[in-house]
Image (cartoon, helix red, strand yellow):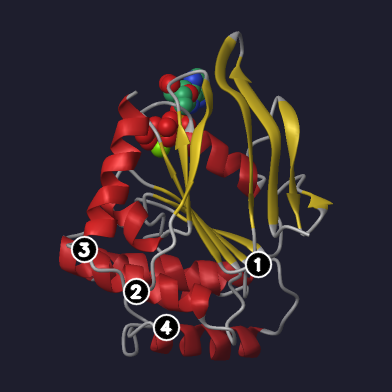
Amino acid sequence: MHIVDVNSIGFSFGEEKVIDDISFHADKDEFISIVGPSGCGKSTLLRIIAGLIRPSKGKILFMDREVNGPTLGISFVFQDFALLPWLTNIENVKIGFSMLNISEEEKDKRAEAILESLGLSGFENSYPNMLSGGMKQRVGIARALASDPKVLLMDEPFSSLDELTADTLRSDILYQLKNENLPVNSVIMVTHNVEEAVQLSDKIIVLSGRPTNVKAIMKVKMEHPRNRRSRAFTKTIDEIYSVLTK
Ligand SMILES: Nc1ncnc2c1ncn2[C@@H]1O[C@H](COP(=O)(O)OP(=O)(O)OP(=O)(O)O)[C@@H](O)[C@H]1O
Ligand SMILES: [Mg+2]
């Protein structure tokens, strides 16, 4: 059984075909990146996997069950954080519990623990606009992790952050995935950053321009932490660029 099965997905806006036919799967402990030209439909594909948009054809399976809408066990991290400015940070995290049937007291306890684990103790009752970009994204990640998801979907989660902040958050996500005691089993990330994809991924899905198809699925088998200056690393980057631009 795969954790996520993307099964012959197609998608059109009216007459306009955006996604032609895309299939791949995510297995346990796999970090998957999706790269492709701007406007090819990456965000649309990720939203289909999340159950936020219905595909025109094909289906998404999560642990062998068809995804028909927002699904407990699949969480989303947004590029622009998507925090609600009128809610405090802890209230934003508690939105992540909306599909869980637990008491208010339990929600507070768990949300505090998650914020603490992400280095945000002391910021529970302040508002998102008082946080730096990196801290806002930590709240976004905390909200996504609140429901103990098996699958984390991320749409360019680090692209608006400075490189140092982005790198710390990348390690945090990798830790969530590779630690056996934590629930996250698979991560699927859309990114424009090929270096980031090679640093994190076990598998890179390279998409073509519209209407989008899978151009290549490239496996990356290097130990973590990966050395960006190593030959294997730069060679993999070159390979991906050559597929992207072919
Ligand atoms: N509501 C909409 N109505 C019509 N067309 C849309 C709509 N939303 C997106 N599109 C089109 O669908 C295509 C795919 O959009 P999508 O946002 O998924 O691309 P993307 O690969 O994520 O792009 P980027 O790399 O710039 O984020 C785009 O060409 C866009 O113009
Ligand atoms: Mg996009």
Local secondary structure at mark 4: helix
Measure how far apart labels 4 and 3 are at the Cα level.
35 Å
* Above or below, 222 relative to 64: below
| Residue 157 lies in quadrant | bottom left
Give the foreground label among 1 and 3: 3
Q: Position of residue 131 (x, y in %)?
A: 24, 70
Give how far across and how far down residue 101 sits, in percent: 75, 76
* Above/below status of 159 relative to 93: above
Which badge, 1 or 3, comes first in the chain's sequence? 1
Identity, as a three-letter code, of the amino acid under mark 1: Ser
- What residue would you read off at disc 4? 115
Horizontal side of residue 9 vs 77, given as left or right: right
The mark that comes first in sequence, 1 or 2, is 1
Label 4 Cα crowd, 10 Å radius (few <14 / some 14-19 / many 20+): many
**96 above or below 208?**
below
| Local secondary structure at mark 1 | loop
x, y percent for residue 228? 21, 62
The residue pinned by badge 2 equals 171
> What residue lies at 65% left-to-right and 26% top-to-bottom?
10
Give the residue at mark 3. 230
Relative to residue 42, is residue 127 drawn left or right? Answer: left
